[in-house]
Image: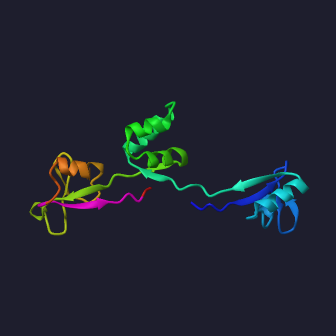
């Protein structure tokens, strides 16, 4: 996140000072509404009326695991959030950053598992495994043919004779 700030001067009617033409204008029909000089904005606010508005970049949200996100949410209801987070995780700095600036939850990678070629009906019709250990004859077999890494390990689908393909979720 950049430490640079921009400043504007806003009057009581909601109009902003236009630094190019030296007057208050409605924002959608104006030019330069900001200045990098806080001092300049303060002088205009004092001389012309209004108050200084400071613009800063929104901080970048950190990416958390589902478990870390639960800790942050539980901390919101705690009298001492930082104490709670440090008692629940060694990643206190990351969690405090998430608490203050916001966060997103990392999506767990998902995979489809291609069955061994000997199971295919023909060379051009691949088969995919289902959670019920049935076989899918088509690529879009649905959610029951998608596995997390943990499930691949649990069902022993992680390696020969199976081939895993990462599923991308283009909807998000």
Residue 22 x %, y %: 88, 65
Q: Describe residue 125's horizontal placement relative to residue 103 as left or right.
A: left
Q: Residue at x 19, y 50 (%)?
A: 153
Asked whether residue 164 is drawn in magenta, I would say yes
Q: Which residues are magenta?
A: 160-170
Q: Residue at x 74, y 59 (%)?
A: 7
User: Extreme left residue here?
Assistant: 118
Q: Residue at x 27, y 54 (%)?
A: 141
Query: Is 20 drawn above or below residue 64 in the view shown?
Result: below
Residue 131 x %, y %: 21, 47
Say which of 46 and 121 sits in front: 46
Q: Quadrant of the N terminus?
A: bottom right
Asked whether residue 147 is drawn in magenta, I would say no
Residue 146 x %, y %: 27, 52
Say which of 39 and 25 sits in front: 39
Say which of 58 and 152 sits in front: 58
Say which quarter of the image contains residue 140: bottom left
Residue 20 x %, y %: 83, 69
In this orientation, does residue 155 appear? yes
Q: Residue at x 52, y 48 (%)?
A: 102
In this orientation, does residue 26 appear? no
Rendering colour mode: rainbow
Say which of 130 and 37 sits in front: 37
Q: Describe residue 141's horizontal placement relative to residue 57 as left or right.
A: left
Q: Quadrant of the C terminus?
A: bottom left
Q: Describe residue 148's horizontal placement relative to residue 32 as left or right.
A: left
């Amino acid at each position: 996140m950049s430490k640079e700030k921009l400043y504007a001067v806003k009057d009581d009617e909601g109009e902003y000072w236009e630094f190019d033409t030296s007057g208050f204008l409605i924002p959608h029909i104006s030019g330069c509404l900001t200045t990098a000089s806080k001092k300049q904005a303060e002088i205009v606010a004092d001389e012309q009326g209004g108050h200084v508005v400071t613009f800063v970049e929104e901080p970048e949200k950190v990416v958390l695991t589902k478990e870390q996100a639960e800790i942050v949410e539980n901390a919101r209801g705690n009298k001492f959030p930082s104490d709670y987070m440090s008692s629940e995780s060694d990643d206190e700095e990351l969690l405090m950053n998430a608490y203050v600036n916001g966060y997103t939850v990392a999506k767990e990678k998902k995979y489809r598992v291609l069955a061994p070629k000997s199971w295919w009906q023909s060379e051009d019709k691949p088969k995919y495994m289902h959670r019920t250990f049935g076989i899918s004859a088509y690529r879009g077999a649905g959610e029951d043919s998608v596995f997390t890494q943990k499930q691949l390990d649990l069902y022993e689908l992680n390696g020969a004779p199976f081939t895993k393909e990462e599923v991308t979720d283009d909807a998000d």
